[in-house]
Structures are given as structure tokens and as C-alpha cells.
Amino acid sequence: MGNKIILPPAMLGILGGGQLGRMFASAAKNMGYGVTVLDPDSHAPAADFADVHLCKSFTDVEALQYMASHCAAITTEFENVNADSMRWLAEQGVPMSPSGDCVAIAQDRIAEKTFIRDAGLDVAPFLAVKTSACLDGDLSAYLPGILKTARLGYDGKGQIRVKTIDDVRFAHAEMKHQPCVLEKMMPLLSEISAIVTRTRSGEVTCFPIAENEHENGILDVSIVPARIKPELAERARQMAMQLAEKLDYIGVMAVEFFVLEDDQLVINEMAPRPHNSGHYTLNATLTTQFEQQVRAMCGLYPGKTDLLSPTVMVNLLGDSWGEDGSEPRWEVLMTAPNTKLHLYGKKLARPGRKMGHFNVLAASADAALEQAHAIKETL
């Protein structure tokens, strides 16, 4: 497999066809590559930009064989893809980035937090709850806390806040006694994220740190540069890059952090792919996170990540659409000369569903934030 460089017009494959796949496909096509998407949804947003859409499951043998024989390299756009499918593709000699092993760690909160802790990086105190028997001891070190399912939790799903031991037992029963992580709630000042890219030959770069605000567990806005001390931003970059190296990670990875009251940084979780909090890079950095994903999987040197302008990214959820499916009032957004709208081509708007985002570029992060909030109100 080596460090062979893959150049256009080679065919690149992606497992998953959501909005991240769509933006990856767009970047790859702009760079001259072909794109094959595997996704069981006939309306997958990425299919609009793909040369080939294999509308089959992520474990479909024929679809995987097609990708193995037609794609020069393959990546993924979400962590709940089948890790064994990724390992099988790698065994066929196709460069996979990230590896199935890295994705398997990110799929399981117990494995993920244990790996991060064992890599010598700070995480919030946590208890692996593999069975109900794990809740028999003294839990005071983890309370008040949050009980999170070990698998398939994202955007605030699969989480219950708990204050007492009785709360924990009740929550675990609610989650049907499946494996969970009990994590101590920390005194948060803010949440930030770092998006790193690591290539096969070991070059690592990091985008400017984003400060993230959530609503109902879903990312609402990302503010770049994050309004934190420069040395704190540098420490986040170093921790994220260290984690990528420990994982022997190839590709783009997001690392989310909690900033605590005493300027302590703890890693909350990682996402083995481009990330919602990196969408500002589509307009505000020299290279986008999606071009970086293409470059990493093709063995190219990562692009420069310089910030061109302070930016605020705002998520557009289905809540902004009318109940009859009518579009938001785009006029204000579309007529502002310093805003950029990105829609994901999803047919059906549902509350909480990510339909698109917009970026506001301004002289300062505060000015961008003020304008972003004003525009969001008008929608």
C-alpha cells in the first residue's frame, strides 16, 4: 500500500452519503477525481455529486466488491458504518482512511474514553458500565453525571443526566441495561473542537480552534477563532495531534474538548471524519476540511489551514422550515455580501434534522456572531 500518491482522475469511494459525504464529493469532483458513494438511502445528499451511487447496505457483498475493484482509495463520512466492512476493504489492498480499527474505537464510548486516557490525555472521570453489576459499588466520584450509551449516541441522543445512585439505576433500566458510560459532569466554561488531518507519511496539521455552542444537544453555532487564551488553543491543537498519532490515524478527525474553570482541558469525544464544527472551513480557511480529507486519503501533503477571516457557522435545522415544507425566508441571508449559504439537498425537513448551514465572515468573531444571530432571527 505504501505512500503511493493517488492523482486525478482516479475514482475515490466513500461509505455514507449524508451531508458530509456530499461536501466531500463536491471537493473531490472540484479536484478532478471521480466519486463512488455507498449509501442505502435512494435520496442520499451525496448522490447529487457522485459519479456512482451504490444504493445498498454497508455490508452488501456485491457493493463492497465493486468498491474494492473500482476505487483507488476509500473513506467514510460517519462513524456508525460497519467497521468490519472497512477492514475487509483494506484486506483487498484498498487504502482505507481512517482504518476500520480507528472507527471501531470511536464507535464505542467505553473503548474511546479508555483509549484517550491510556494515551495520557485528560478525560472527565468515567465508569465503564458493561453490566448492571458495575453499578453496585460507590458511584459518588461520578455524580452528578451523565449516563451515556456506549454505542450509537450522537447529537445528544442516548444520554440521561443523573444525580443519585437511584437515578443511575433507573436510567440504566431505561436504556435496557445496555453497555454505558457514567461520566462525571464537569464545571464547563465552554466547549471547543480541533480538527486535525494526518497523512500516511505522518504529517499532521490542525485547523484553527472552534468554540461551539449547543442547543438541545445539537451544535448550534461555531465561533472561529475560539474566544479563549492563545495558550489554551495551542494546548488543544497539541492534544488533538497527539491523539491522532497515538491512533496511527489517517484522514480528518475532530476532537471535542470541555474547557473547565481552571483552564483545564478534557477531551469529550472524537469523530473519525470531518465535523459539523469544521464547516466554517468551506469559506474561511485556505483549505477546507473536505479537501483535506481528499488529500489525506490520496497520500498528498495536507493543505495550509490559515484562517482568512473570523467566522461564525450557524446550523440550519428543519425547525426553520414551515410545517408545510415551505422554505425559510432566505432574502436577508442571500443579500448580505459577507454570508455564505450551504444547503444539503435533503428532500424532507424535520425538527432537529440538519438541513444546511451558513457562514458569516466579519472583521471580528463578535461582529460575525451578532450578525449571525440577527440573520437567524429573520429566518
Image (tube, helix red, strand yellow):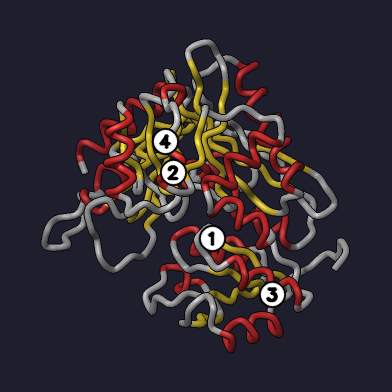
Q: Would you say 77 lies left or right of 223 here?
A: right
Q: Could one spot residue 171 in this view of the protein?
A: yes
Q: Secondary structure at mark 1?
A: loop
The answer to which image quadrant residue 102 occupies is bottom right
Q: Which residue is mark 1?
A: 77
Rounded to the nearest angstrom, the CA distance separating label 4 from label 2 is: 6 Å
Which mark is in front, 3 or 4? 4
- Going by the numbered disc 2, the residue's amino acid type is Ala
**Residue 251 percent across, percent down from the top left:** 68, 53
Give the camera-side residue of 96 and 286. 96
Q: Secondary structure at mark 3?
A: helix
Rounded to the nearest angstrom, the CA distance separating label 2 from label 1 is: 36 Å
Q: Would you say 321 lies left or right of 253 here?
A: left
Q: In the image, which disc is placed on residue 133?
A: 2
Give the camera-side residue of 365 and 143. 143
Q: Residue at x 36, y 24 (%)?
A: 144
Q: Are marks 4 and 2 in contact (CB under 8 Å)?
A: yes
Q: Residue at x 26, y 42 (%)?
A: 332
Tell me if residue 378 comes above or below residue 291 in the rendering.
above
Q: In the image, which disc is placed on residue 89?
A: 3
- Going by the numbered disc 1, the residue's amino acid type is Glu
**Residue 213 percent across, percent down from the top left:** 38, 31
